[in-house]
Amino acid sequence: MFSIIMCGGSGTRFWPVSRRSKPKQFIDITGNGPMVLETCNRLSPVAGDEEIILLLGRQHLSEARDIFKGRKVHMLAEPVGRNTAACMGLGVIYAQYLGCKEAVAFLPADHFIGDPHSFLDALRAAGKLANSGGIVTLGIMPNRPETGYGYIRRDQEHTDLGKLTAYRVSEFVEKPDIKKALQYLASGEYYWNGGIFVATPETILKEIKEQLPDLYRGLKRLTKTFGKEQFEAELRDVYDGLADVSFDYGIMENTSEKVYVLPCECGWSDVGSWASLYELRSEGHDEDQNLADGDTLLIDCESSFISGRGGRLIACLGLKNCLVVDTPEALLVADLNRSQDVRKIVKELKKTEKENLL
Amino acid sequence: MFSIIMCGGSGTRFWPVSRRSKPKQFIDITGNGPMVLETCNRLSPVAGDEEIILLLGRQHLSEARDIFKGRKVHMLAEPVGRNTAACMGLGVIYAQYLGCKEAVAFLPADHFIGDPHSFLDALRAAGKLANSGGIVTLGIMPNRPETGYGYIRRDQEHTDLGKLTAYRVSEFVEKPDIKKALQYLASGEYYWNGGIFVATPETILKEIKEQLPDLYRGLKRLTKTFGKEQFEAELRDVYDGLADVSFDYGIMENTSEKVYVLPCECGWSDVGSWASLYELRSEGHDEDQNLADGDTLLIDCESSFISGRGGRLIACLGLKNCLVVDTPEALLVADLNRSQDVRKIVKELKKTEKENLL
């Protein structure tokens, strides 16, 4: 099963570990290696390296080459970011060029999956369904009234797929307020949208042709140049002329295809903040609910997350709900409950002359 | 006025900036340069460099030479620490060797004086009084019921010294509990013992002869060797045989001399912790009561003390009463109200193999 791994995203919420030159997907956030590597390794039972296509920014190509040294995953570098519709379109025509005719999985590079077995079962079932047409999304079972994610509402109509069931999608809804999120959770009809899609190249290209004809023309031009010298120049030229459109808005909102949601309980997390990482790694907590990586000495601390990546001793005394992230160039000390606001620091740094720390 | 500056003390409470190899008196804690340098510079209206004698540990000699490069202060390195009685005795005979006949001031190297003018006035008055006999201590006016200091109780009998008044000492009392400290503060008869004494060499040596005859004999031996080749060896030999006795217990408790306390309001602080330094430097606080040194970025922080000495950016988010001290080798993050317990960290480090961080 071909898999297209989308490695965009700046991951400013993991500053100072994530940087513009090395965003979240390229760093070891969870302790299991760089997230993009973990994402690919997780797929190995369904997709060999030669069926994996990484879509990434040109500036991250050497980083990715380092990470996948000696491995045969494919890499396509976009000259500029043009959002997910272009990214997925490019991935799809490249998969076709490599001989792919069946359903392809589209996956973000930087998500965590606690139960890879269930995840792969869902992916296989989605592939099977998509091979007979339509677009399948994985629906993440919500376990809290999260307001930070988009939701997918299911319809009554469903298809049995062995142990799993796919539903027709009733609607995609944007990030709700807490009141709506509570309703969604209670209804049992809503799933989190994890941005994971499965469809055949044929289906995707038919949709792009109908709904984003400019993108379609660009992709047609590129198809002829794969493996040829002029590919790079042609890619730059095509991308220069493309609009910035997401797959969700550009394709999914008005698709005439059948759209399915396949509910999936796989311990998914988008690992959106230091606090969510702290919760995700609960197995690593000590008896006072501290999570400490690196060379640390904790006295009378509780519920704190110490990430020592600077190679130095970090001594902590009397901390509670505190986040400490130490790197060689910059140090972050924050209220762990405020970790969503780490973005504010990056925003402030952009205003100053500290470009090198972004 | 000869001044003997006592540079002992390990200053573990300022870890990680203070280390065994560079204790508090040799580092820039207040922002005005190394404390021992500040202590000497403060004395310049009453004591020229050639009248200043630094008593220090052998292991700190090169540090002190760096700090006082090109200056003519005298330095005497004790081969081992033998507490204040030996230290003051050695200082006194060296002052005599240098020609001193009048009152000498004995001062700790690592105290802060907010009002040097008043301090020097008190020192001059104390010198005048001591020249006619007796031992004069400066009594620091208490402004809070501090339980961390010893106190001096004054008697009724007093001597006018121009604008200042010296009292006979009724008793020296050890660190009180909070109940007693409140009584002391309310009575108006008690002062903090800042460890600052003034007396003539003659008086000090007479007391040592009477109360610590072993020390006296040792000092007599040393007197003959100043400036000679055998001094170092003789000093080591004498010190090896000395008992560890403080001036307060060894001399002051049973002295037959007149003992005076000269009350002094000079903004004194022993700068005993990061928290006391934070309070001392209130002029540097921002509108949210944060004190930040170095390259820092603070968002929604209050009453926090950030000391950046590691040359890196420190970004802080949502902190309250937090202490962050960054150095190249180690980082401290603590509840600012727990800064007295920084000693616990040093104690823990001693147990581990992190000797290099002590």
Image: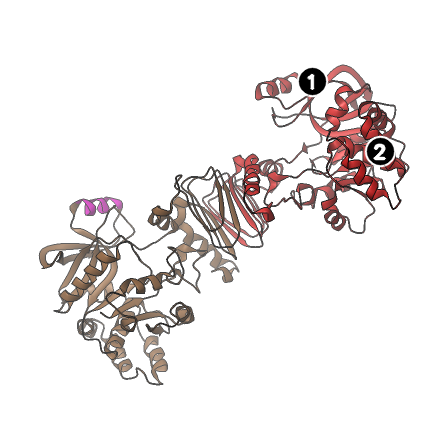
Chain colours: A red, B brown
Crowding around mark 1 (Cα neighbors within 10 Å: few <14, some 14 to 19, many 20+) is: some
**Mark 2 sits on what residue?**
A219
**Mark 1 sits on what residue?**
A189
Q: Is mark 1 on a helix, strand or loop?
A: loop
Reply yes or no: does residue A23 show up in magenta.
no
Q: Which amino acid does label 2 sit on?
A: Leu
Q: Where is residue A284 in the image (x, y as percent from the top left)?
A: 60, 42
- Earlier residue among tags 1 and 2: 1
Q: What element carries label 2?
A: helix
Q: Position of residue B34 (x, y in %)?
A: 38, 61
Q: Nearer the viewer, residue B190 or B171?
A: B190
Q: What residue type is labelled 1?
A: Glu
Residue extending furthest top? A156
Q: Nearer the viewer, residue A264 or B300?
A: B300
Crowding around mark 2 (Cα neighbors within 10 Å: few <14, some 14 to 19, many 20+) is: many
Reply yes or no: does residue B182 show up in magenta.
yes
Eye-nearest disc, 1 or 2: 2
Q: In this view, does A135 lie above or below A155?
A: below
Q: Position of residue B66 (x, y in %)?
A: 42, 69
Left or right of residue A229: residue A174: left
Q: What stretch is highlighted in magenta?
A: B178-186
What secondary structure predominates along the stretch shown in magenta?
A: helix
